[in-house]
Image (cartoon, rainbow, N blue to C red):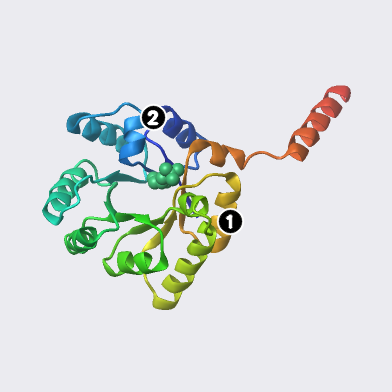
Amino acid sequence: MKFFIDTANLAQIKELNDLGILDGVTTNPSLMAKEGIRGEENIIQHYKTISDLVKGDVSAEVISTDFDGIIAEGKKLAKINSNIIVKVPMIKEGVKAMKWFTDNNIRTNCTLVFSAGQAILAAKAGAKYVSPFIGRIDDSNWDGVQLIEQIANIYAIQGYETEILAASIRSSLHIVQCAEAGADVVTSPLEPILGLLKHPLTDIGLAKFLSDAKGAK
Ligand code: G3P
């Protein structure tokens, strides 16, 4: 399973990149606004900085909701760097646009996916990635991880090549569950990824090894 970081924060992207386990980045308009990146030129520049910094795929989201607008924006975003993935919402015009991008060799990430039916449509449109928002599903008292499992089963049965990119991650446990459920990629904020490191027995064990090593000197 690939690890993407779900942020537009450069320090956090660098931190995970330095660790050597970063496979890509996802962003969205809310994450860009959180970093104070506003205005088309600044947003394009920020995507350029991120996509120069990391080797893997970087999702850049369109904000148009009509076919022509999505195509125009997507073309502009795709030109920034070869590792840019155009992120398109799961709406009717979005599906049409994703099929157009597929036919024109522009890779897409279908975002705001909350059901298996939507994931089937994304695959039919040839999306490179499909992004089920598992945390938001949990928030509405459904089971987000179960959706990942369902999509993984459907894609395996049907032979769809779209990669399942589990998004809206809230915890380290979510990451483990997504790996178990068959996600191809998980995109997470920094904390749940770093949380995977933690176990009290590791800390206790290391303290003992270090104190014994000191005593043996
Ligand atoms: O990037 C999309 C997704 O990960 C959003 O997560 O936490 O806003 O539900 P969240």
Residue 179 is situated, as x and y percent measured from the top left of the image, at 55, 57
If the image is split into quadrants, where does the C terminus sit? top right
Quadrant of ligand 1: it is top left
Instruction: Tell me how many marks there are.
Output: 2
Q: Compared to 135, does 152 lie above or below?
A: below
Of residue 38 and residue 79, the one placed in the foreground of this image is 38
Q: Which residue is drawn at 49% across and 39% down?
A: 20
Q: Is residue 157 left or right of residue 199?
A: left
Where residue 8 sits: x, y (%)?
Answer: 37, 34
Callout 2–callout 1 Cβ contact below 8 Å: no
Q: Name the residue under label 2.
A: 10
Q: Position of residue 62 (x, y in %)?
A: 23, 46
Q: Which residue is drawn at 44% across and 50% down?
A: 167
**Residue sitting farthest toward the front:** 140
The answer to whether residue 103 is seen in the rendering is yes
Tell me the tag on residue 177. 1
